[in-house]
Amino acid sequence: MKIDNFYRKKLSNGLTVLFEERKLPVAISSVSVKTGAEYEQERTKGVSHFIEHLVFKGTKNRKQQEISGEIEKKGGVLNAFTSEEVTCFWNKLPSRHFSLGIDIASDLASNPLFDSEELEKERKVILEEIKMYHDNPQYYVIKKIKSLLFEKPFGMDISGTMKTVSGISREDVLKYYGDSYFTGNMILTVVGKADFEEICKLGEKIFPKKIKKVQEIIPIKKNQQLIEKRKGLDQTHLVLGFHVPGMRDKKRYVAEILNVILTEGMSSRLFQEIREKRGLAYAVKGILQQDRNYGNELIYVGTTKENVGKVKEIILKEIKKLQKLEKREFEEVKEQLIGLRNVGSEDSEEVMTQLIYEENAGNAEEYYKYEERINGLNAEDIRDLARTNNYSFIALIPH
C-alpha cells in the first residue's frame, strides 16, 4: 500500500523515523521511547512517569528554563506523556523551526541530567499529583479499576503510589533509564511541513547509536469487584470494565464498534438508557484503552447510591443486547467511526500519537488502513465480544 504523504525509515543507528507531510506551515515533532509503566517492577512503580518529569529539569545542553524558553519564544508549545508502553516528549512549532523541535525533543530523551536536588523537588510534585487524582472521585475510580482488571505490578497506576514514588532513588532512575532509553527503542515522529531527508539526517546526527534487547512484558488479566466508601461525597461514582483485544489482535477494531454503540455521544445506547430515558445520571462515558499487549473497555457513570445496582444491570443488559445487533445499525456505526477518524485526522497531535502507538504495536502504516479495517468487520465479530460474562466493577459511594 503506497501512502503519498507518509514516510517511514529505520536509520543505521537503530532509530525509527515516521513522517506525515502537510502543507500547513506547522510541525509537531516527538521522540518516543518504547517503554512505560508496563515494564516496571512493583517496588519502583511510577519510575517511567518520574523520568518524564525529570528530563524537563535540565539536560547536558540546556537548563530547565531554556528547554521551555527556546520553544515558547518561537511561538511553540511542548509537553510529554507516559502510557503503559510509551513515553513521549513532543513539541509543536512553526515549520521553519522544525529542526529546533527535533533537537529539543532528542535532548530531553538523550541527555537528561537527573540532578539529585531537582529529583527531590520533582518527587514532591508527583506526590501532590497522586493526591490530586485520589481526591477527584471520577479520576479515582477510572484509575482504580485497573487494579481489578490486572495483577500487580501492571495493575498499579502509571503514576505509582505514595509509597513507591517516595522510595524511588536516583540509582533506580539511572538504571531504568539506561535499560530503556536507546536508539533501537526510540521513534522520531514529525507531522507537518518539513523535509523527510533532513529529518533523517538530523536523526542520524543527533542520536548516538545504541541497540539492545528489551524483554517483552505480558500483563496478567483478572476480574474483580470492589465497593468503597468515602466521606464527603454526594454522588456515587462507578466503573464497569472488561477485557477487549489489544492492538496486535486482528479483532482489535471490534472494540471500537462496541465502544461507539454503547457510549459515543448523546445518541449512544447507554446515554439514552441511563440518562435520557431514566434520568439516573448526568455523566455517562466510555473509555477504550488499547496498547500492543492489552485492551479494556471502561464505562463510567455518576449516579446516586440507591441506583448503583440498577445502572450496573442496564450496562450489562445493553452489552448482551449487542449479540442481536442488526446489520443496519452496524453499518451506521462503521460510517460513524470512519467519520470520527477523518475529523480527528485534522489534529496533528492526534495523528502523531496514533502513529506512535501503531508503530509500537507493529507498523505505523496500519494507521492509514483504518477505513479498510473497519469496513472489513462483520456483525458476528461484535456478537462474539458481547458474549463475555467476565467483567470488573468498582463503585465509590458516600459514607
Image: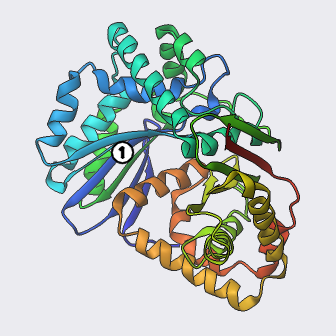
Q: Position of residue 314 (x, y in %)?
A: 77, 67
Q: Nearer the viewer, residue 23 or 346?
A: 346
Q: Position of residue 9 (x, y in %)?
A: 44, 52
Q: Quadrant of residue 272?
A: bottom right
Q: Residues within 10 Å of mark 1 (few under 14, many from 20)?
A: many
168 on left or right of 397: left
13 on left or right of 99: right
Q: Position of residue 104 (x, y in %)?
A: 26, 35
206 on left or right of 295: left
223 on left or right of 7: right
Residue at the spot x=53%, y=30% of the render?
159
Question: In the rendered image of this protein, does residue 141 appear above or below residue 339?
Answer: above
Question: In the rendered image of this protein, does residue 311 appear above or below residue 305?
Answer: below
Q: Quadrant of residue 195?
A: bottom left
Q: Quadrant of the C terminus?
A: top right
Residue at the spot x=82%, y=69% of the render?
317
- State the residue lying farthest toward the bottom: 328
Residue wearing tag 1: 30
Q: Nearer the viewer, residue 382 or 265?
A: 265
Q: Position of residue 296 (x, y in %)?
A: 70, 53
Under tag 1, what secondary structure?
strand
Residue type at numbered disc 1: Ser
- State the residue lying farthest toward the left: 73
